[in-house]
C-alpha cells in the first residue's frame, strides 16, 4: 500500500481505577454504574468487599441469631456460620462483578478485606480515582449502620465519591 507500513498498536495501560465497595448483595446495584463508568473511561474496576469486623466479633460472642435471607433459615450466630454466610455473599458478588466486567470488556479485580467499613474505604480510596458506593433505600438494622459508615467515608474522602441509590441509572 504505497510504502505505508501498518503498525500494531498496543493496548493503552490502565491509568484510572474505579473502586466499587460492597458489604452485602444489597449494594450490588452500584456495580452496573461503576462498570459503565469504567468502560467509558477505560478504567480498571476494583471490587472491594468489606467483612465487617464488628459483625464477626458479635458472632464470636454467640449472643445473637443469624437470619439467612436467601434460605429463610435462623441459626445461632456462631463465628463459623457467620464466616460461611459472609464468604457466600462475597462469592456471589465476585461472580456478578466478573460477569458484568466481561460483558463491558472492563479490566477488573476483586478483593475481600476484614475491618471497619470507614477505614477500609479510606484505604481503598487512596489508590482510586473514583469510589462508587451504594446507599440502600431500605433502612433495616445493619443496613442502616452500613449506610452511616458509607456516609462517614464520603464526608472524609479525599477522592470523588459517587453514591448510587437502587434503581438509579447513569
Image (cartoon, rainbow, N blue to C red):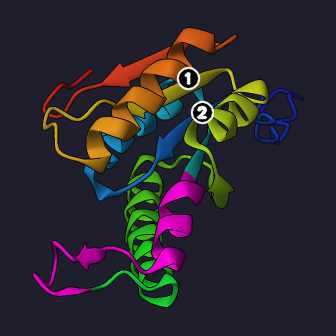
Q: Which residue is mark 1?
A: 153
Answer with the quarter of the image where residue 43 lies: top right
User: Of 122 and 102, which appears nearest the observer?
Assistant: 122
The x, y position of residue 153, in whole percent, is 55, 23
Question: Can you say whether 97 is above or below 86 in the image?
Answer: above
Q: Nearer the viewer, residue 148 or 33?
A: 148
Asked whether residue 66 is drawn in magenta, I would say yes
Asked whether residue 99 is drawn in magenta, I would say no
**Lateral position of residue 154 relative to residue 12, left or right:** left
Residue 60 image offset from top left, x and y in percent:
54, 78
User: Label 2 to label 1, Cα distance in Å?
Assistant: 5 Å
Q: Quadrant of the C terminus?
A: top left
Q: Which residue is mark 2?
A: 118
Residues under numbered marks 2 and 1 in contact, where contact means CB atoms less than 8 Å apart? yes
Task: Residue 126: give its label.
Answer: none
Residue 29 appears anywhere in the view? no
Which residues, given as a range, are shown in magenta?
Answer: 49-75
Residue 153 vs residue 109: left or right?
left
Amino acid at each position: 500500500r504505497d510504502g505505508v507500513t501498518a503498525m500494531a498498536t498496543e493496548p493503552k495501560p490502565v491509568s484510572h481505577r474505579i473502586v466499587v465497595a460492597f458489604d452485602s448483595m444489597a449494594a450490588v446495584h452500584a456495580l452496573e454504574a461503576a462498570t459503565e463508568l469504567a468502560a467509558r473511561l477505560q478504567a480498571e474496576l476494583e471490587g472491594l468487599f468489606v467483612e465487617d469486623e464488628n459483625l464477626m466479633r458479635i458472632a464470636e460472642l454467640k449472643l445473637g441469631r443469624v437470619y439467612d435471607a436467601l434460605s429463610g433459615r435462623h441459626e445461632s450466630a456462631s463465628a463459623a456460620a457467620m464466616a460461611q454466610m459472609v464468604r457466600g455473599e462475597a462469592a456471589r458478588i465476585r461472580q456478578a462483578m466478573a460477569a458484568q466486567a466481561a460483558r463491558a470488556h472492563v479490566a477488573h479485580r476483586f478483593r475481600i478485606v476484614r475491618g471497619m467499613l470507614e477505614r477500609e474505604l479510606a484505604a481503598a480510596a487512596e489508590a482510586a480515582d473514583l469510589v462508587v458506593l451504594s446507599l440502600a433505600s431500605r433502612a433495616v438494622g445493619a443496613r442502616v449502620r452500613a449506610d452511616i459508615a458509607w456516609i462517614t467515608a464520603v464526608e472524609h474522602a479525599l477522592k470523588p465519591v459517587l453514591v448510587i441509590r437502587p434503581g438509579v441509572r447513569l
